[in-house]
Amino acid sequence: MSKYELKRLAVSLGARIIAKLGPPLPEETGYCESIKVEEVSSSKLIRLVSNDDDNKFSTIVLRGNTKNTMDDLERAIDDAVNVY
């Protein structure tokens, strides 16, 4: 997992990244309502669901039949998010 993905996960769950050994304190842990392993197009993904009104993160799952299609979709989504 990259540092960016780890930070995004921590922020979206209300957790704090810690770099110490030992159990985390209650204020360092995050919360989500459910964790599910789902299969989308023969790829497994972990789905963390948090119905918190303060949560400002969303995930978009893209599927395409070729790498070029996926690159075009990724660019389109990136452009749309940046315009918003």
Image (cartoon, helix red, strand yellow):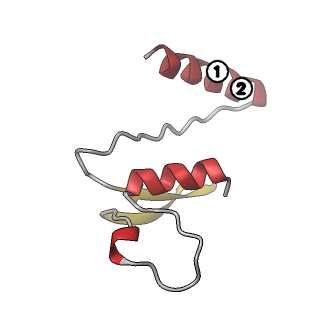
| SS assignment at label 1 | helix
Q: Is residue 31 above or below residue 58?
A: below
Residue type, label 2: Asp
Q: Is residue 48 above or below residue 66?
A: below
| SS assignment at label 2 | helix
Check contact, mark 2 vs mark 1: CB within 8 A.
yes
**Looking at the rendering, which quadrant does residue 42 occupy?**
bottom right
Percent of width and height locating residue 30: 37, 65
Residue occupying the point 34% across, 62% down: 32
23 or 71: nearer the viewer: 23
The extreme left residue here reads: 53
Q: Is residue 66 above or below residue 38?
A: above
Q: Which residue is mark 1?
A: 75
Residue type, label 1: Arg
Residue occupying the point 59% across, 71% down: 19
The answer to whether one can see residue 41 in this image is no
Residue occupying the point 68% across, 53% down: 2
The extreme bottom residue here reads: 22
Total marks drawn?
2
7 or 76: nearer the viewer: 7
**Looking at the rendering, which quadrant does residue 64 occupy?**
top right
How many residues crowd around disc 1 within 10 Å: few (fewer than 14), some, or many (20 or more)? Answer: few
Question: Residue 23 vs residue 49: left or right?
Answer: right
Residue occupying the point 60% across, 35% down: 63
**Looking at the rendering, which quadrant does residue 54 occupy?**
top left
Percent of width and height locating residue 10: 47, 57
Percent of width and height locating residue 56: 35, 39
Q: Which residue is mark 2?
A: 71
